[in-house]
Amino acid sequence: MITINESSPIPIYQQITDGMRREILAGVFGPDSRLPSIRELAVELKVNPNTIARAYQDLANEGVIYFKRGQGAYVSPKSSDDLLKQARQEMAKHIGEIIAIARSMGLDRAQIRNIFDSVLEQQEVK
């Protein structure tokens, strides 16, 4: 499920784009499956339909989704290798953001690695 953080500096349309990409990568929406309509998703997320339309257009420009005239938006058929590559790029982007924050706090490579390893270990316990 896509969540919107109104206090985030990330624009809402970008949060929706990122959320839809994550849901597609996680298999919530498979290849050639229909996405919620702009209106449906706008009501669900309590945002302006134009915001959803912009997010969908960005995804279409990236080739993640495509539109069928009068039928809505659909997930582009992609190979599992394409999806894995895309997932890795998404993870690298987020890890890069985290590293930038850690460096701005004065943490060095070893400290960042220790934090990462600690969090990873906690996740494995669950």
Image: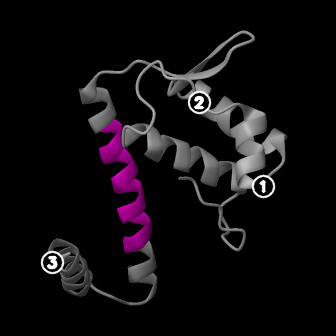
Separation of residues labelled 1 and 2 (CA atoms): 17 Å
In the picture of the structure, the residue carrying the numbered disc 1 is: 46
In the picture of the structure, the residue carrying the numbered disc 3 is: 125
Which amino acid type corresponds to the residue marked 3 in the rendered image? Val
Disc 3 element:
helix
Relative to the observer, which residue lies in front, 81 or 3?
Answer: 3
The residue located at (34%, 54%) in the rendering is 92
Relative to the observer, which residue lies in front, 16 or 11?
Answer: 16
User: In which image quadrant can residue 36 be found?
Assistant: top right
Which amino acid type corresponds to the residue marked 2 in the rendered image? Leu
Relative to the observer, which residue lies in front, 68 or 17?
Answer: 68
Chain-order first, disc 1 or disc 2 = 2
User: In which image quadrant can residue 49 be found?
Assistant: top right
Question: Which region of the structure is painted magenta?
Answer: 85-99
Q: How crowded is mark 2: few (under 14 residues within 10 Å), some or many (20 or more)?
A: many
Residue 61, image x, y percentages: 60, 26
The residue located at (46%, 83%) in the rendering is 104
Disc 2 element:
loop
Chain-order first, disc 2 or disc 3 = 2
Residue 50, image x, y percentages: 83, 39
Residue 53, image x, y percentages: 75, 34
Residue 26, image x, y percentages: 36, 43
User: In which image quadrant can residue 9 be found?
Assistant: bottom right
Q: In this view, does 11 lie above or below 67?
A: below
Which amino acid type corresponds to the residue marked 1 in the rendered image? Lys
Q: Residues within 10 Å of mark 1 (few under 14, many from 20)?
A: few
In the picture of the structure, the residue carrying the numbered disc 2 is: 35
